[in-house]
Each structure stands twice: as structure tokens, then as C-alpha cells.
Image (cartoon, rainbow, N blue to C red):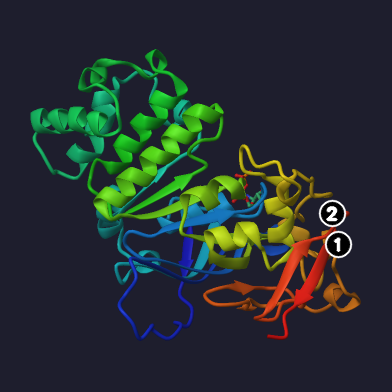
């Protein structure tokens, strides 16, 4: 992985956020076969704030999550800034980066069975980052592992179990305990409830919410499911083809997306128990583009039911779309709403008030 410095954006006037990502680009490979997976993403997370990142498979969400802690393979080139408490992760020396991983920010990956080591007891696995960071003696680290298990709703005695002795939901709780082991300020959860059944999914989401609020942590939660994110998070960023195309307060983005892609994604993911006409599930035809062969103009235009002729040639930047909201669509004005139309298209309603 290569980090390339680019020109800094101006510093905000107000207090420094916990995480401030500026103009982040990630490209896999080089030359004609390069894959621009993340293209100029800006994000901010304050302590105690929960940011959801939504988008279909292939939109660059996991690449973004891994980039935040420089966990990408060597073929990835990064540029921009990732300021965690004001320190740039991209230019950090290795020693400092090792200290920041787990203790500054930690990641809960999807699929706990693959992330846990099958041949080690879970208590040892939770204690490992504590020992690696020299935070405690082996005995104290194991005591702490038991406390962490209790914090995530498991008996401390489960520390002696192997991963295969636990259910999927219990293993995900272990992953969360491990992520908390070195008292990070930011948790990045990449599809933390994928592959869990709906009841367990809800329990894990409530657990994450509780821990984040009790410990005043920042949270980035990644999912393709806009309904889940809108229930859990304060703000949402919707990604398409490596870019954020819409951002704003979570419930507003879910209920009344301004970008036709946000609108289509919210229609595709109804809330459980909310299959009213407003949120009857509707499929979004087609697939996100191959990042190595992006369409011209707005990358969503080939799938967009509201596309104008100009969308095939003119790219759109994020623009204000209401208080604390932005969207990258030519149809969007601060007072405008783009709502799903009766046939799966979108209708634009501009308020004159
Ligand atoms: N190691 C890699 N080398 C080359 N291309 C990659 C690599 N990892 C991911 N990509 C490509 O980068 C793009 C973004 O992938 P990424 O996994 O970040 O998307 P995603 O939105 O997280 O999707 P998913 O939810 O399926 O994980 C995809 O086109 C993917 O094929």
C-alpha cells in the first residue's frame, strides 16, 4: 500500500472532529488495469456520533473502512488525509500506526467465524491486543478479557471456549469485545450483522449502540441496508462507484433521499414491519459500474430513472440539499426533494416557500 500526499483542505474553524477524512482516493493496481475504488471521499465523525455508510456491493465501502487504518494490500495507493484526533493516518510512521490500531480505532469485520482464530480460546484472542500494546500483564489481560465478555453480554467463563463452540451472534459479540479491548475512540463496523438472523441482528445493533453511547465513542457502520443504518446511526453517507453521492441526517436520508440512488436504495430496503406503500421493497435494476470502466458524466446515469440528457456527459459534485444535507445530483436544489415515483422512477418536487 502506498500513501501519496496531496494538498490539504483548509482546517475547519470549529473544534477538531474525532475523524476527519479529506479527499480520500484509493486505487488498486496501476496503469490501464487500475481500479479506482474510492474517489475523493470526505467524512467527519465526532465523538459520540454514529455515521452509517451505505451502498451496494462494489461501491467501495470495505475499501474505505480498511483504508482508515491502512489495512489495505500493497497494491493499493492512497491519497488525501485521514485525520484521527488531528493525526494523519496516511503519513504516520509504522510504530505510531501500530499504536493507533486497536487503541485509537478498531474494526469489527463481517463474518466473525473467519475473523476469529479457530484454534485459540476466545479469551486469549481478546487478551492478545491488550498484550501487544503492553497494557497489562498476561493475568490482568485475561481478567480484562472476562470483563469485556460480560460487557458484551456473555459470561466471563466463555473466555475458555473455542470459536466453534459459540453461536454466530455470540462470535460477533466476541468480535465487539475484541474491538473494545484497548479502549479505542472510534469503532468501524463493516457489515457487523451480515449472516445473522433478524432477531440476533437487532440485539447486536442495540449492543453496539449502547456501547458507543456509554463510552462516547465514534462509530462508522457500513452496510448495504439503509433501513438498518437509519435505525442505528445519526448521519448517513451513501456511496456509489467510489464516491459519496448523498449525506445527511440518517432518518431524513432514508425517508426522503435527495439523490435518485439514495431514493432507490431506501426503497429496496424497507424497515421490518414497515411494508407500507412508501417503503414497499423495490428492486434497483442493473448493477453498479465496474470501477475500472466508469460511465461518463454522472456514474449513476445509466441506471437513473430521472436522468437528463446532460447527465451522460456532466459529472456532479456534492451540493447543498437542505440543512446539513448534500447530494450530487443535477436535479437537487436546497429546497428540492426527489421522491420515488409510482412506477419506481423518481419525481422531483420543488418547494417555492
Ligand atoms: N484487493 C483488490 N484488488 C483489486 N480490486 C479490488 C480489491 N479489493 C476490492 N477491489 C475492487 O474495488 C471495488 C470496491 O470494492 P469494495 O469491496 O470496497 O466494495 P464494497 O462496497 O465494500 O462491496 P462489498 O459489500 O461486496 O464488500 C470493487 O470493484 C472491487 O472489485
Which mark is drawn over residue 305?
1
Say which residue appears at 40% left-offset and 40% top-offset. 206
Which mark is drawn over residue 187?
none
Residue 155 picture location, percent across and down: 24, 21
309 above or below 172?
Answer: below
Residue lying at the far right of the rendered structure:
309
Residue 63 picture location, percent across and down: 55, 53
Badge 1 element: loop
274 above or below 345?
Answer: above
Position of 259 with respect to 165 (left or right) is right
Say which residue appears at 71% left-offset and 59% top-offset. 263
Position of 142 with respect to 4 (left or right) is left
Which of the 4 image quarters holds residue 178?
top left
Q: Nearer the viewer, mark 1 or mark 2?
A: 2
Question: Would you call the spot at circle 2 few (<14 residues within 10 Å), some (14-19), or many (20 or more)?
Answer: some
Residue 319 picture location, percent across and down: 63, 80
Which mark is drawn over residue 344?
2
Say which residue appears at 85% left-offset and 59% top-offset. 345
Amino acid at each position: 500500500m502506498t500513501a501519496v500526499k496531496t494538498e490539504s483542505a483548509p482546517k475547519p474553524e470549529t473544534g477538531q472532529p474525532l475523524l476527519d477524512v479529506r479527499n480520500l482516493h484509493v486505487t488498486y493496481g496501476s496503469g490501464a488495469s487500475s481500479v479506482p475504488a474510492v474517489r475523493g471521499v470526505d467524512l467527519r465523525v465526532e465523538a459520540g456520533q454514529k455515521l452509517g455508510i451505505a451502498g451496494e456491493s462494489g461501491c467501495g465501502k470495505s475499501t474505505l473502512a480498511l483504508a482508515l487504518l491502512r489495512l489495505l494490500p500493497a497494491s493499493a495507493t492512497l491519497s488525501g488525509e485521514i485525520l484521527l484526533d488531528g493525526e494523519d493516518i496516511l503519513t504516520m510512521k509504522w510504530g505510531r500506526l501500530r499504536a493507533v490500531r486497536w487503541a485509537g480505532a478498531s474494526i469489527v469485520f463481517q463474518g466473525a467465524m473467519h475473523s476469529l482464530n479457530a484454534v485459540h480460546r476466545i479469551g486469549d484472542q481478546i487478551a492478545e491486543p491488550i498484550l501487544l500494546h503492553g497494557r497489562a500483564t498476561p493475568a490482568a489481560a485475561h481478567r480484562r478479557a472476562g470483563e469485556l465478555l460480560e460487557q458484551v453480554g456473555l459470561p466471563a467463563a466463555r473466555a475458555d471456549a473455542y470459536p466453534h463452540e459459540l453461536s454466530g451472534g455470540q462470535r460477533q459479540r466476541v468480535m465487539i469485545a475484541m474491538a473494545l479491548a484497548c479502549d479505542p475512540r472510534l469503532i468501524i463496523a463493516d457489515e457487523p450483522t451480515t449472516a445473522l438472523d433478524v432477531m440476533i441482528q437487532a440485539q447486536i445493533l442495540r449492543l453496539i449502540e449502547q456501547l458507543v453511547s456509554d463510552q462516547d465513542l465514534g462509530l462508522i457502520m457500513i452496510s448495504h441496508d439503509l433501513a438498518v443504518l437509519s435505525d442505528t446511526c445519526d448521519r448517513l453517507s451513501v456511496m456509489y462507484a467510489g464516491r459519496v453521492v448523498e449525506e445527511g441526517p440518517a432518518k431524513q436520508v432514508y425517508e426522503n433521499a435527495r439523490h435518485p440512488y439514495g431514493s432507490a436504495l431506501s426503497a429496496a430496503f424497507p424497515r421490518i414491519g414497515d411494508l407500507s406503500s412508501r417503503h414497499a421493497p423495490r428492486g434497483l435494476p442493473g448493477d453498479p459500474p465496474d470501477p475500472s470502466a466508469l460511465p461518463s458524466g454522472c456514474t449513476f446515469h445509466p441506471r437513473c430513472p430521472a436522468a437528463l440528457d446532460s447527465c451522460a456527459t456532466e459529472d456532479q459534485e456534492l451540493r447543498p440539499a437542505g440543512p446539513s444535507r448534500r447530494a450530487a445530483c443535477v436535479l437537487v436544489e436546497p429546497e428540492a426533494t426527489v421522491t420515488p415515483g409510482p412506477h419506481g422512477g423518481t419525481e422531483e418536487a420543488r418547494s417555492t416557500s
